[in-house]
Image: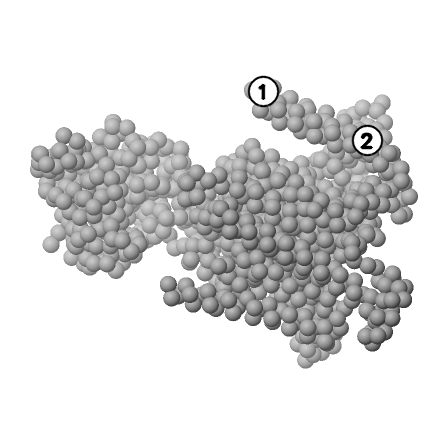
């Protein structure tokens, strides 16, 4: 059984389903990437895994435990971390306070975790007293990831972490994400920059209209001529 | 010499009263801005909350006086203040439970929440009147002056008198303590930070495991405290009359919006902007003018606006800010 | 679909039922407390209903919160003073030019400031605007103050104001609407398009200021000295004329009625007929406009502002239109109220009574439904009056077990505030349990 096993997910916001029998699994320490055309239900699939969307069918297990009925907050307590695509920091709070709020549900001393986050993102240590709203886009994404890491999640979910940042910043962010995965944290991420994301992915999911279209290692998907032609622009 | 006399007159009639009034407005605006940033609506019941809190303080003050308890040279009302805060905060929590909670659950539009606060305003209005009536009440029983006109003359030998009333000093000192405590709470404590997080980004706060019910409850308690303190200070400095407190709603809203609604520092700055404009524009400058230009005999009072129009000052500043800088002097929330 | 038909059926019984209850209450009042009192409540209730119609256009059609109905009402009330009062001899020739010149200077200064603000750049802009405004203000005061002194010196015990034009009172009603509409345009222009509660706060402010002006500008409306003897609108007669008319007295005696009582009732009935005509006209106009493309668009905007804006509708402009129209109706009601009272007493304008109570009427009646506003206007006014009457009795009964003394007296004295409590609770209950009101919008 995989560490995260979200199987046969079917559901949506209103009457019409967005997800159709969609399955996502992530192993420990693995980077899984969801790619696909606009409106394919990538973010919706991620939200379903995190419990922000009611499922009509299907089930989500984390580390063998059924969490299908849990609220997002309870899933955070079970070891999930989520970085939304937008509005993912507290803009009028300092970087340090943002991280502190990330650790809100923890009752133990979280200073060690904060140091780890600062080691991972040295720029944040430098700007710890600055308001998150005043940072650049890339730095803000680092704060957002750092905030999610403060609960010491076993699974980190990122919704388009590189949206709206420059290619250089994107490369740096991906490097950091690899570093996070090396520390044993599973990563599930939705990406618009499919090619670059698949390059770092252990596993890739191509979703089309809320259903699994192709599933393979990142390398194999990049090599697949059909995938290249339809989704990666040649 | 004449210049000093002019300065003394300005201090006596403009700076001192405007500072005290500004501190009262600032505390009121802090309450409005706090509700705005956490519950995201303009609370029309705030003026009547101030009236209710002050009414309770007055009743307890009378009780203390009847028991022979006093606070030395300070007004007994300051002793009664903590009890008044407790009662008002309890009422706020009760109101939230009975009234507002439901609208949060159904995620009602802000303008519906404003309408609901109008209903609460009616009820609070009635409660206050049941409690204490509609008449003007003076409940300041402390020493009247820190410096009176004669002491000032003996001290300085100046012709122009200056008086400093105890209530003005009490207002400013209490306001400083209150604001310092509030900012310490919001900036340094876990609960305070979680309130700021909730105000900044509600969804992310929920994701981070911040309990919205606790944040809202603490907000109401603080608002009750701020309203009671603001109302009591205003009542000590001037006098208590239920309807006056309803009318304070306009300068209080103006202060909060001028400073940038949702921004606590802005609320304080806005309070002083409004109070200094109001006092400055409605003060009769004749005396100061004759000191500065002895040859000039003004035939009027050199008063820019009659005091009957003091609310027009708040309103004009409010309109100017809405036209030129809707987010306020300090960047407020844009929702 | 069946559920829709169900709703249609219940509402088709609902409206006649509630109006029947309302009529029964008025009849009951007539039989128990006399027809004078019943008609008095009904007339004021109908005036409140017109105010509610105006507020309903804003809140019910467009979701705009007007927290300053009192101000537009008071401003409308100025019209009968300026239009139908006899002119004060010498006032216009003595002070008129000065006041006109002062207002001209004020308008020129504001326009010049706006022009400078739009056309200059850099640091000089702020300085120039400030300088123009300061010079303008002092010139204005220099022209205005002596003119006011002249006017206020004329026969101050009875007049001391500009006086009116001596025109028929009916003309003043639409003028009241125009005055209120003008003020609403100014407020709406600045506060609409921003956050929804900014309009509420801005209107709260303008209302306080309008009432402050009416209280303090003696040259205009004698301020707190009040203007008395405002002429009645045609064809409403005066009681004294009726009592002196042999025909009327003979008719009353033929019906076995006291001519004096008969005359007061006749006057109230005449007002009633006028008010009903105005209400029917307003309802007809509003219903027609709601069915028009303009009305459908208004409701589309209210129901989903974002998608309406996305479809290219200029939401702010539509809001301004409806806000001005609604305020005009409130101003009309204000002018009518002053004609009914026959006097202008600026101190009587109270925001709880004339702003927030009207909102209660609209919401209880049913936001967005014109008939609901009529029902709410009369019904809530009835409850308001009766709560004032019953309050002391109920309180007296409640306080009976307490020993005589301070507490008991205090409780009985505070009974008039019962109506605030009743209104607050009614509003909260309706918002919570029946947000669409007694007569829901179709």
Q: How many marks?
A: 2
Position of residue A143 relative to residue C59, above or below, is above
- The residue at 10%/42% (across/down) is A216
Camera-side residue of C427 and C273: C273
Please give left or right for residue B93 compared with residue A86 in the image: right
Q: Which residue is mark 1?
A: C120
Mark number, residue C98: 2
Give the letter of the chain under mark 1.
C
Camera-side residue of A82 and B115: B115
> From the image, which quarter does the N terminus of chain A lie in?
bottom left
> From the image, which quarter does the C terminus of chain A lie in?
top left
Disc 1 crowd rating (10 Å Cα; few below 14, some 14-19, many 20+) is few
Q: How far across and down, in percent of the image, does residue C96 sit? A: 82, 34
- The residue at 69%/43% (across/down) is C179
SS state under label 1 = loop
Q: How far across and down, in percent of the image, does residue B90 sit? A: 53, 62
Q: Are marks 2 and 1 in contact (CB under 8 Å)?
A: no
SS state under label 2 = helix
Please give left or right for residue A173 compared with residue A227 in the image: right
- The residue at 60%/37% (across/down) is B319
Residue C337 in view here: yes
Please give left or right for residue A135 compared with residue A197 in the image: right
Q: Which callout, 2 or 1, points to the residue nearer the camera? A: 2
- The residue at 33%/50% (across/down) is B207
Q: How far across and down, in percent of the image, does residue C250 sit? A: 87, 71
Q: How far across and down, in percent of the image, does residue C329 sit? A: 64, 50
Residue B21 picture quarter: top right
């Amino acid at each position: 059984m995989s560490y995260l096993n979200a199987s046969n997910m079917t559901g949506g916001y209103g009457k019409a389903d967005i997800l159709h029998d969609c399955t996502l699994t992530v192993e420990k320490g693995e980077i899984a990437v969801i790619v696909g055309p606009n409106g394919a239900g990538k973010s919706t699939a991620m939200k379903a895994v995190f419990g922000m969307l009611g499922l009509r069918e299907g089930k989500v297990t984390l580390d063998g435990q059924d969490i299908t009925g849990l609220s997002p907050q309870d899933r955070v307590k079970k070891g999930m971390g989520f970085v939304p695509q937008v509005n993912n920091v507290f803009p009028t709070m300092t970087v340090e306070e943002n991280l502190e709020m990330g650790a809100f549900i923890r009752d133990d001393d979280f200073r060690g975790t904060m140091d780890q986050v600062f080691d991972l993102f040295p720029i944040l240590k430098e700007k710890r007293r600055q308001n998150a709203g005043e940072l650049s886009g890339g730095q803000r994404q680092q704060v957002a990831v750092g905030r999610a890491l403060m609960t010491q999640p076993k699974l980190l979910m990122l919704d388009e972490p590189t949206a709206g940042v420059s290619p250089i910043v994107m490369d740096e962010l991906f490097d950091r994400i690899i570093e996070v995965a090396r520390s044993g944290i599973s990563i599930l991420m939705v990406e618009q920059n499919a090619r670059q994301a698949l390059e770092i992915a252990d596993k890739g999911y191509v979703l089309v209209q809320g259903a699994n279209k192709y599933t393979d290692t990142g390398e194999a998907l990049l090599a697949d001529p059909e995938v290249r032609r339809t989704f990666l622009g040649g | 010499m004449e210049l000093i006399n002019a300065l003394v007159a300005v201090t006596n009639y403009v700076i001192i009263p405007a500072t005290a009034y500004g501190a009262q407005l600032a505390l009121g605006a802090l309450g409005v801005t706090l509700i705005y940033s956490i519950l995201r609506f303009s609370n029309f019941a705030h003026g009547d909350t101030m009236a209710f809190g002050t009414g309770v303080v007055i009743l307890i003050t009378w009780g203390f006086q009847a028991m022979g308890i006093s606070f030395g040279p300070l007004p007994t009302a300051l002793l009664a203040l903590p009890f008044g805060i407790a009662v008002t905060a309890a009422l706020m929590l009760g109101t939230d439970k009975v009234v507002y909670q439901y609208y949060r659950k159904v995620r009602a539009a802000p303008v519906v929440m404003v309408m609901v606060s109008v209903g609460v305003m009616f009820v609070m209005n009635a409660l206050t009147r049941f409690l204490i009536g509609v008449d003007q009440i003076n409940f300041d029983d402390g020493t009247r002056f820190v410096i009176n006109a004669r002491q000032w003359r003996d001290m300085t030998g100046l012709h122009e008198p200056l008086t400093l009333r105890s209530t003005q000093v009490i207002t400013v000192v209490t306001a400083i303590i209150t604001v310092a405590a509030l900012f310490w709470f919001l900036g340094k404590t876990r609960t305070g930070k979680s309130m700021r997080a909730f105000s900044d980004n509600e969804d992310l706060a929920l994701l981070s495991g911040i309990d919205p019910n606790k944040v809202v409850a603490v907000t109401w308690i603080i608002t009750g405290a701020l309203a009671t303190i603001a109302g009591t200070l205003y009542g000590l400095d001037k006098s208590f009359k239920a309807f006056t407190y309803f009318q304070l709603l306009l300068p209080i809203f103006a202060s909060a919006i001028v400073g940038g609604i949702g921004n606590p520092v802005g609320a304080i700055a806005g309070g002083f902007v409004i109070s200094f404009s109001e006092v400055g524009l409605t003060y009769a400058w004749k005396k100061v003018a004759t000191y500065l230009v002895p040859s000039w005999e003004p035939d009027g009072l050199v008063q820019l606006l009659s005091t009957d129009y003091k609310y027009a000052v708040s309103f004009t500043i409010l309109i100017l800010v809405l036209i030129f800088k809707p987010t306020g002097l300090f960047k407020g929330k844009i929702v | 679909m069946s559920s829709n038909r169900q709703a249609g059926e219940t509402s088709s019984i609902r409206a006649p039922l509630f109006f029947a209850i309302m009529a029964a209450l008025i009849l009951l009042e007539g039989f128990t407390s006399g027809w004078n009192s019943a008609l008095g409540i009904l007339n004021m209730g109908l005036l409140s209903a017109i105010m509610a119609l105006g507020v309903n256009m804003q809140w019910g059609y467009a979701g705009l919160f007007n927290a300053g109905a009192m101000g537009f009402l008071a401003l409308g009330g100025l019209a009968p003073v300026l239009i139908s009062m006899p002119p004060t001899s010498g006032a216009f020739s003595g002070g008129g030019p000065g006041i006109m010149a002062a207002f001209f200077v004020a308008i020129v200064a504001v326009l010049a400031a706006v022009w400078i603000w739009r056309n200059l750049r850099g640091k000089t802009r702020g300085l120039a605007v400030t300088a123009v405004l300061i010079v303008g203000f002092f010139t204005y005061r220099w022209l205005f103050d002596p003119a006011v002194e002249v006017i206020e010196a004329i026969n101050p015990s009875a007049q001391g104001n500009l006086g009116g034009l001596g025109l028929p009172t009916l003309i003043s009603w639409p003028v009241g609407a125009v005055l209120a509409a003008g003020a609403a345009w100014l407020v709406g222009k600045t506060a609409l398009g921003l956050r929804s509660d900014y309009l509420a706060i801005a209107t709260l402010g303008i209302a306080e200021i309008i009432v402050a002006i009416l209280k303090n500008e003696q040259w205009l409306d004698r301020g707190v000295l009040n203007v008395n003897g405002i002429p009645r609108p045609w064809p409403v007669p005066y009681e004294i004329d009726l009592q002196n008319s042999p025909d009327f007295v003979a008719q009353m005696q033929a019906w076995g009625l006291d001519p004096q009582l008969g005359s007061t009732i006749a006057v109230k009935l005449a007002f009633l007929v006028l008010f009903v005509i105005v209400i029917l006209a307003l309802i007809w106009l509003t219903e027609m406009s709601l069915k028009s493309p303009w009305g459908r668009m208004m409701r589309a905007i209210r129901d989903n502002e974002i998608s309406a804006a996305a479809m290219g509708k200029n939401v702010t402009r539509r809001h301004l239109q409806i806000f001005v129209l609604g305020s005009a109706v409130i101003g009309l009601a204000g002018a009518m109220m002053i004609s009914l009272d026959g006097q202008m007493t600026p101190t009587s304008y109270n925001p709880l009574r004339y702003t927030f109570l009207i909102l209660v009427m609209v919401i209880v009646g049913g936001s967005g439904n014109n008939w609901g506003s009529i029902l709410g206007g009369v019904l809530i006014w009835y409850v308001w009056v009766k709560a004032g009457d019953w309050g002391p009795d109920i309180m007296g009964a409640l306080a009976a077990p307490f020993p005589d003394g301070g507490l008991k007296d205090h409780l009985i004295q505070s009974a008039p505030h019962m109506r605030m409590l009743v209104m607050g609770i009614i509003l909260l209950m309706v918002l919570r349990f029946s947000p669409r009101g007694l007569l829901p919008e179709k």
